[in-house]
Image (tube, grey):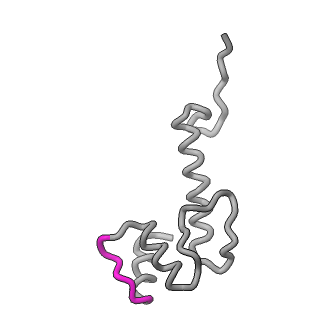
Amino acid sequence: MQMEEIRQKAKTLGIKATGINKTELVRAIQGAEGNFPCFATAKDYCDQLGCCFRGDCLEREDTAAQEAKEARGDISRDGKRKAVKRK
């Protein structure tokens, strides 16, 4: 979900959306909608089936895991494993 859509959703729920980052804003919305305020904390699974951010959250986790692997040098940017040089 784009940030403008998130701000609009926050506005309809009476949540002030200025001066707050996306993660904090989404968590505020989640709480206001009766879900756990857990955006971006999922580890491969989310039981909040009614949360409108569920797909974004799980996708974000996949992206974060991919970036961490790239940073460690485990995989290349195209997602392929790098060859390990043995001594």
Which residue does the image show at 42% across and 73% down from the upper left?
25
| Residue at the extreme left | 19
Residue 54 position, x and y percent, is 61, 70
- Please provide the residue range marked out in magenta: 13-19
Which residue does the image show at 65% across and 80% down from the upper left?
50
| Residue at the extreme top | 87
Residue 43 position, x and y percent, is 65, 57
Q: Quadrant of residue 85?
A: top right
Residue 4 position, x and y percent, is 40, 74
Judged left or right of residue 78, residue 24 is left
Task: Reply yes or no: does residue 67 show up in magenta.
Answer: no
Which one is nearer the viewer's eye here, 82 or 46? 46
Q: Measured along the vertical axis of the image, is residue 60 above or below residue 3?
A: above
Which residue does the image show at 55% across and 34% down from the upper left?
72
Magenta: predominant secondary structure element?
A: loop
Task: Reply yes or no: does residue 14 show up in magenta.
Answer: yes
Which residue does the image show at 68% across and 14% down from the upper left?
86
Q: Quadrant of residue 3?
A: bottom left
Tally of numbered discs: 0
Quarter of the picture containing the C terminus is top right
Residue 57 position, x and y percent, is 58, 64
Judged left or right of residue 35, residue 8 is left
